[in-house]
Image: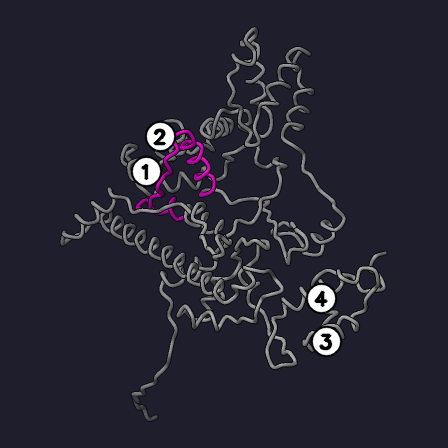
Amino acid sequence: MNLSQNLNVQLSQKLVLSHEMLQSLELIQLPVLELKEKIEQEAIENPALEIVEKEDSEKEYSQKEKDLDDEIFDERDRYYCDVNNNTYSSCRSSNADDDDSKRMFLEGAVSLKEGLHDKLKWQLHLSEMTDEQKEIGETIISYIDTNGFFKEDLMAIFPDNTDEALEVLENIQMFDPPGVASADVREALLYQLESISEDEVNETAYEIVRDYFHLVLERKDVQLARVMGISIDEVKKAFVYLAQFELYPGRAYDNSADNYIVPDAVVYMKDGEINVEINNEVLPELKVSEYMEKIAKAAKGKHAKDEKNRFVIEKVASAKKFIEIIRNRNNSLFKVILAIVQAQKEFFRRGSKYLVPLIMKDIAEEVGLAESTISRLTSSKYIQTEWGIHELKYFFTNAIKKKDGNVQSSESVREMIKEIIEENKGEKISDQKIADILQIRGIRIARRTVAKYRNILNILPSAKRNI
């Protein structure tokens, strides 16, 4: 048996994406509301990343409660509404089947869950309270807000029988859902923790809610770990444990109206000029914790770094990179929107009929980004215009060649078809007739293309129109 050794050199190419690059690719395609959630989630996971609070002392506490809820819990039953082609407003659940949603929209059907007040009143009337107490209970229930909180002053509502009203309130607080009629998030969590058996309670989590909840709201994880004499990992485990409880007991029974799309930018005319404003109100302002950065700077000068110092250095570096990624994402989005507005300026002046053919490659060359990056940046991003709210991808349209050799955008042709049908309401104008009119106007398209565009506009065929 012959043994031999050979040394072979082989060249190969591999695409290796760093964590920062993967994070950047993820963030640039998020719409503004989802980006806000991602930022808040990052802030709760990284103690070196801080959200700059707005100067509104009256709303500070409730806003922090909301931030905490958004960071720990996933949003449920999220809805959005959109306006397409200025013809109708469509609303649908983000996880609903498209056909079911369309049918519900057309039929005007509304499916409501059981309301919180109805559920509480049902339990009230099943209780063994007296008629007078039930009457007090109905009044108390009417003051419970959609989050499930009772924040009113009992003495102001029931000046003559405050003690009895307090007894009724305490009975209502034992109703389902757990934590209902509490004064705030802390009380709701405490009630839920105290309602389960002792062997199921995480003592660290309970102590955090009972004694140090203000540090949780202010996201001072390091200080929280220090004053409790525990590690950062134990703090995180306590947060994971608390995530199983409901911060807002009434949220699951909320029948409030659907949430609407928040546009990433607003484009409007002023003094004959087109103005572009990026929506910066929704996204929180970020900064690196001065305290953590100070520790990191001191630790970098040491030759031997312990585990705590390495943790702080890593988190400060991660916070800086995250802030830079957000800044680059916002700057790139602004450049893309400006380029689109410049390319489609006649649309913003005169409406959908004046859209011109535009492809992503044109915008990519204009702003100096890859075409794939433009695709991600324009995905699920919306701008508000004087002609409705439109997704950024709405402005990328195919070209239709005219008789004179020039081109017309497919979107503007659809608008022309809609105009022709509206101008001929007295007669059931056929698709072929529409194609003939368009040909007179210099636009040559087939009858089947007219039918396709008419379907996109949700306009019935001539035989079924005006029935």
Residue 255 shown left or right of residue 284 in the figure? right
The residue that disc 3 covers is 440
Residue 33 shown left or right of residue 14 in the figure? right
Q: Amino acid at mark 1?
A: Lys
Q: Which of label 2 and label 4 is nearer to you?
A: 4
Q: Is residue 128 above or below residue 219?
A: above
Residue at (86, 56) in percent of width and height = 467
Which of the pair 125/161 is nearer the observer? 161
Q: Earlier in the sequence, mark 2 or mark 3?
A: 2
- Helix, strand or loop for disc 4: helix
Quadrant that contains the N terminus? bottom left
- Distance of mark 1 from mark 2, alpha carbons? 10 Å
Residue at (32, 51) in percent of width and height = 319
Q: Earlier in the sequence, mark 3 or mark 1?
A: 1
Residue 40 in percent (x, y) is at: 42, 45
- Distance of mark 1 from mark 4, alpha carbons? 60 Å
Q: Earlier in the sequence, mark 1 or mark 2?
A: 2
* Residue 67 among those drawn in magenta: yes
Q: Earlier in the sequence, mark 4 or mark 3?
A: 4
- Distance of mark 3 from mark 1, alpha carbons? 70 Å
Give the class, few, some or many, for how many residues have Cα within 10 Å of label 2's Cα (few <14, many ≥20).
some
Residue 415 in percent (x, y) is at: 67, 64
- Helix, strand or loop for disc 1: loop
The residue that disc 4 covers is 417
Residue 102 shown left or right of residue 397 in the figure? right
The residue that disc 1 covers is 220
